[in-house]
Image: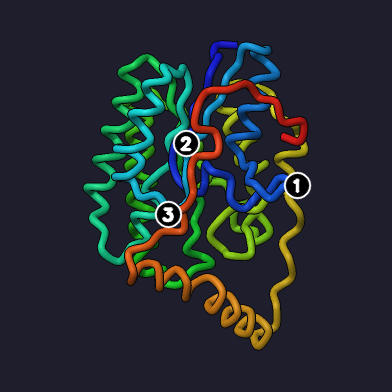
Amino acid sequence: MRWHNFVAVGDSFSEGMDDPYPDGTFRGWADLVATRLAAEAGPDFRYANLAIRGRLLPSVTSDQLPVALAMRPDLVSFAAGGNDILRPKCEPVAVCDSFHDSITRIRATGADAIVFRFADVTLRLPGQRLVGPRVAYMNERVGETAEQTGAYLIDLYQDDEFRNPLLWSIDRLHLSDVGHRRTAAHVLHALGVAADEDWMLVPPHPAPAPWLLARSADLRWAGRYLAPWVRRRLTGRSSGDLISAKRPSLAPIIREDA
C-alpha cells in the first residue's frame, strides 16, 4: 500500500451528508475509503477529515488546505466549489482557477490528489438554466486540472446511475448512503484498491409519480429545504456555521461500523 495517511478537505460532500452512522454523525464516501485503505495499509494508517458542510471554495483553500498540508499527507481528496456555483453571484472562471491552484499546491508537496467531476444535481433542483452551464464548465476544468497535475479523477458526471433519485437524499442535493457507497467504490477503483462489490449496486429507479403527487412533493421540498437555503443566502449564514471538522487531526480508524 503506497498511502499511509489520507486527508479529506471540502464541504458536505466529503463530510458525508446524508449518510449517518447509528449515532447520527455522518459517515460518507471518505470514511468508507479510509476504512478500506486502513485495512490494506495496517495499523499505522491515519485519516483526517476537515470537510464542513456549506463551505465555499475560498474558505476551503484558506482554512482547510493549509491545515491538511501541514499534516504532510500522502493522499488528499479535494472536493470544493459546488456551493460556489450554486450562488447567483458566482464567477466560474475564478472558482476554477482557484481550484486548479489548490490541486497544484497539493501535488507540489508530493502528495497524491483526488478530484471529482460532480454528478448532475440540476436534474432535481430549480435554476437549471443558470447552474447547468456552470456545472458543465467546472467539470470540464476539473478534468483539465486532473490531466495537467496527475490527480486521480473520479468522474461521477459520466455515471448515469447518479440519475437515479435513490442515490440522493430527501433534500435532493446530498448523496444518500447508496450514493456514498457507489462514490467510495469509484474512488477505490481509481486508486487500484479493491472495493466491496455491493457498493456499486443500486436499487431500480422508482416509478414516476403522478403529476399531482409530484408537484405536492416539490412544494413540501421547497418549504423544508429550498426556503431555508434562500434565507441563509439572504442573511449571510451557512449550514456549517456551528459545525467543526469531524476528524480534525490524523488518527487511526477505530469505528467498527465504518
Element type where label 2 sits in the image: loop
Going from N to C along the chain, the mark reached first, 1 or 3, is: 1
Q: Residue at x 70, y 40 (%)?
A: 200
* Mark 2 or mark 3: whose residue is earlier in sequence: 2
Q: Residue furthest bottom?
A: 212
- Mark 3, residues whose alpha carbon is within 10 Å: few (<14), some, or many (≥20)? few
Task: Say which mark, if any, is on residue 241.
Answer: 3
Q: Residue at x 41, y 27 (%)?
A: 68
Q: Tell me, yes or no, if residue 178 can be seen here.
A: no
The label on residue 22 is 1
Q: Earlier in the sequence, mark 1 or mark 2?
A: 1
Side (left or right) of 131 relative to 91: right
* Amino acid on which the number 3 mark rests in the picture: Asp
Q: Position of residue 227 (x, y in %)?
A: 47, 76
Element on which disc 1 rests: loop
Q: Is residue 129 above or below residue 29?
A: below
Nearest the camera: 74 or 24?
24
Q: Amino acid at mark 2?
A: Leu
Residue type at the position of mark 1: Pro
Q: Would residue 18 be seen by someone viewing this image from the given angle?
A: yes
**Real-space Cα separation, disc 1 to disc 2, in angstroms:** 21 Å
CB of mark 2 within 8 Å of CB of mark 3? no
Mark 2 vs mark 3, CA separation in Å = 14 Å
Residue 217, relative to residue 33: is it above or below?
A: below
